[in-house]
Image (spheres, rainbow, N blue to C red):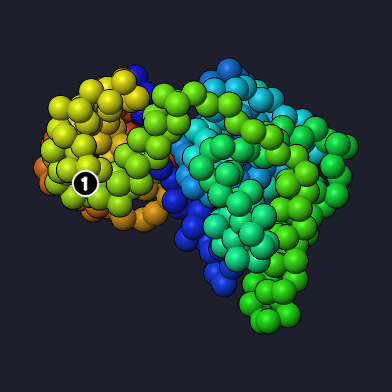
Amino acid sequence: MIIFMYDMHHKKRYRKLQAAAVLYTYNFSEETRRDEPDTWAYSWYPNLHDSLELVLIQDGVVHWTIGGREYHPKPGDILVVNPFELHASRMTASEGSATYYLLYMELSSFRHSLGSDGAEVLQHILSGEESFLEYIKAGDDTALAEEIRLFHRLFIMQDDTPAGLCRMQASLFSILGHLMDMRHPTERSGCDKQRYVFINEVEKYTSQHFSEDISTDQIAEAMNYSAAHFRRVFKECFGTGFQRYLRSWRIRYAACALHNNGLSISEIAEQAGFRDYNYFSRAFKQETGLRPTEWYARRRRAQGQVPFTTE
């Protein structure tokens, strides 16, 4: 069964430009390393989004999966997650600590600045006809790594004056220029392209309406499918029915929300689209193996064991 999320949380970081950068640091305690060395002490659910995502490893080891391909980047390596590419990351406690940069860019915001040829290339990237090189080893493009670090420094300065915005925009264009030199056609059959479009449409619709009471017939109608045809295509693409998928989507949203904000569990349940708290609690345990209160308590303890900083 394939369950993943359409992730838009990074867009909340955007200010004047449709781009953002963050430095993540994870550091596991000696106790955690000793008692749970081989467990996934940190992991992020498989997700996708329409943004371009760049990952620059500063130090440590973080395991990444992009489009079903496994990567184990070393410090200085760069990973490029093309739009709508399913990806996830994880690390074990025995690996101690890791620091890496994440940079997000909305390629559509550059269309009017690159002329017709550049806009056409970006459209090919966004449609999946082409893609940027996915894995850049340390030393292969040191200038790109420096540009990522530079944009991060500029971004955290929060200088949104015309001069500051010009500097950030220049850095983004430089990054995009490096990537333009490293692109290639994406080989997809006609069937793969249809699945690609279908999955993206489902994920977008779900991300916008998951807190509502959505029936399978409603989403089928919204996507201009007959109910029967939608059910068949959905099962082929996701390996389950829409209502089961929607429940899992809501649970994973709630799990992330419990970790990242101070709302009560009942408020999180309602925000995620559950009107009955008891049903939410049962579904949450079926999905995660823990009751919401247990999950929340473990996350609170983990915040002490695994310091998480964004600079």
Element carrying mark 1: helix
Q: Quadrant of the C terminus?
A: bottom right
- Asked if residue 64 is positioned above or below residue 209 in the image, the reply reads above
- Asked if residue 166 is positioned above or below residue 70 in the image, the reply reads below
How many C-alpha atoms fall within 10 Å of the one at disc 1: few (<14), some, or many (≥20)?
A: few
Is residue 289 visible in this depiction of the protein? Answer: no
Classify residue 152 as left or right of residue 20: right
Residue sitting at x 63%, y 38%: 131
Type of amino acid under label 1: Ala
Q: Which residue is mark 1?
A: 222
Can you name the residue that lies furthest to the front here? 116
Q: Quadrant of residue 4?
A: top left
Picture coordinates of residue 102 (x, y %)? Answer: 64, 48
Query: Could you say which is closer to the camera, residue 117 or residue 195?
Result: 117
Q: Quadrant of residue 185?
A: top right
Is residue 204 visible in this depiction of the protein? Answer: yes
Query: Could you say which is closer to the camera, residue 103 or residue 222?
Result: 222
Q: Quadrant of the N terminus?
A: top left
Residue sitting at x 59%, y 47%: 52
Picture coordinates of residue 42 (x, y %)? Answer: 54, 32
Residue sitting at x 64%, y 59%: 116
Q: Quadrant of residue 255?
A: top left
Residue sitting at x 35%, y 46%: 204
